[in-house]
């Protein structure tokens, strides 16, 4: 089968799909490694609590401010070039961190890693779309949505063993190895990342007009805001659960890491199930409403002091699992929002930029609620309220997408 640009594609190139997903998992490991290793980093560099907070949130700040720009760039220079550039930036940032001798250098390296993360996050969906048949594309993009929990969960799994071998440096070398493997895999599959000629609109030059066409669609903004409600819930749980298990229940760090890891990884099968349901033409709006509603109920149970601890923990896992329906439904919506291949990056960037607002604001708002009311349980109002808003936004998205004249699984 020919795989050059414009050639007809007869089947989805699953190795090429796996290579692009691996790049996402690799940059997600970069996102998660700092929060896991924050205590060793504070000891090694003498960081204050404020400096540690800036180091941890540098990636979110970059995503909040420039994701759309990265998405626009993907349309201009091409998904493959931007993805490989992102891998290169991640490698430079990782090596820079290992060589850093002071906080400013460490923070600068973190910002470079953040640029690499954004470049891969908005460009990999373009590669995935190019490597897959239209029939499989919605499922492939839904699976891609699991890259973040998969990468963070992977780092959580290996951290206890790697720390024994080489401290925080070993975690950074692990991420560098993942990035190198992902970059090499994508490069070797480069001939499969071309759209068929019939899918390319010759009038679309990937310029401002194409980006504006995406950004003026109310559905794109509605899905982005819904993504933010989910990000707030999930990252609230990621921050809250380890602290609760350690401070309120006195569990050893090994148990805290294991239970937190299970919770995060539960999001991965949720994403895959969401993709499978979309592939069976279940409407996107239904999945968004179902995911938001069930995650809200589970979040309420997780924060309820009236329930046994086992039930509360299973509710945390439930939030992560059923919430997987949300990112899988939103990220696959580029099959509806993007009218041409070059617009995929713009939509991915827009949705990520809005979602990172919820991810960035969630933890400090939770901390403020706990500080003002004196207990963790009272903070449930924020994530549960976000879930209720998610249900309303899901209903709105359902109605809007019907106006496109397509089924949700297009």
Image (spheres, grey):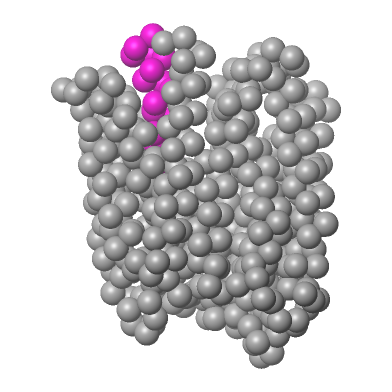
Q: Is residue 358 visible?
A: no
Q: Position of residue 112 (x, y in %)?
A: 73, 44
Q: Is residue 39 above or below residue 384?
A: above
The quadrant in which residue 59 appears is top right
Q: Position of residue 248 (x, y in %)?
A: 33, 14
Q: Main secondary structure of the magenta part?
A: helix
The residue lying toward the viewer, choosing from 5 and 364, is: 5
Which residue does the image show at 34% across and 32% down from the upper left? 316
Which residue does the image show at 61% across and 30% down from the upper left? 155
Magenta segment boundaries in residue numbering: 232-250
Which residue does the image show at 33% across and 59% down from the upper left? 287
Q: Position of residue 5 (x, y in %)?
A: 78, 78
Q: Tell which residue pokes out farthest to the bottom in this image.
A: 203
Which residue does the image show at 37% across and 84% down from the upper left? 405
The quadrant in which residue 38 appears is top right
Q: Is residue 17 left or right of residue 149?
A: right
Q: Position of residue 346 (x, y in %)?
A: 58, 69
Looking at the rendered image, the quarter that the C terminus falls into is: bottom left
Q: Is residue 230 left or right of residue 65?
A: left
Q: Is residue 285 above or below residue 375?
A: below
């Amino acid at each position: 089968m020919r795989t050059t640009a414009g050639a007809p594609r007869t089947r989805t190139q699953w190795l090429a799909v796996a290579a692009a997903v691996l790049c996402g998992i690799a940059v997600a490991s970069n996102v998660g490694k700092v929060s896991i290793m924050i205590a060793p980093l504070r000891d090694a560099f003498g960081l204050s609590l404020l400096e540690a907070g800036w180091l941890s949130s540098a990636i979110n700040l970059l995503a909040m401010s420039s994701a759309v720009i990265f998405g626009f760039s993907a349309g201009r220079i091409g998904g493959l070039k931007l993805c490989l550039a992102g891998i290169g930036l991640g490698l430079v940032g990782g090596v820079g961190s290992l060589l850093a001798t002071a906080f400013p250098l460490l923070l600068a390296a973190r910002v470079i890693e953040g640029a690499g993360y954004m470049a891969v996050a908005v460009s990999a969906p373009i590669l995935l779309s190019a490597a897959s048949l239209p029939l499989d594309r919605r499922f492939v993009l839904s699976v891609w949505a699991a890259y973040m929990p998969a990468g963070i969960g992977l780092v959580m799994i290996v951290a206890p063993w790697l720390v024994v071998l080489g401290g925080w440096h070993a975690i950074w070398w692990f991420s560098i190895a993942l990035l190198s493997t992902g970059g090499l895999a994508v490069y070797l599959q480069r001939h499969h990342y071309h759209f068929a000629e019939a899918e390319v609109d010759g009038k679309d030059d990937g310029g401002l007009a194409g980006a504006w066409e995406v950004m003026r669609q109310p559905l794109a903004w509605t899905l982005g805001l819904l993504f933010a409600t989910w990000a707030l819930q999930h990252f609230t749980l990621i921050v809250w659960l380890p602290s609760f298990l350690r401070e309120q229940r006195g569990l050893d760090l090994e148990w805290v890491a294991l239970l937190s890891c299970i919770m995060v990884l539960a999001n991965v099968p949720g994403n895959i199930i969401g993709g499978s349901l979309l592939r069976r033409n279940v409407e996107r709006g239904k999945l968004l409403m179902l995911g938001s509603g069930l995650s809200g109920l589970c979040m309420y149970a997780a924060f309820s002091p009236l329930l046994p601890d086992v039930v509360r923990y299973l509710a945390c896992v439930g939030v992560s699992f059923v919430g997987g329906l949300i990112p899988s439904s939103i990220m696959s919506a580029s099959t509806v929002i993007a009218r041409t291949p070059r617009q995929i990056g713009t939509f991915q960037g827009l949705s990520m930029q809005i979602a990172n607002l919820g991810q960035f604001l969630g933890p400090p708002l939770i901390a403020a609620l706990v500080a003002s009311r004196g207990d963790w349980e009272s903070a449930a109002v924020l994530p549960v309220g976000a879930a209720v808003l998610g249900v309303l936004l899901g209903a709105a998205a359902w109605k809007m997408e019907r106006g496109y004249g397509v089924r949700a699984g297009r």
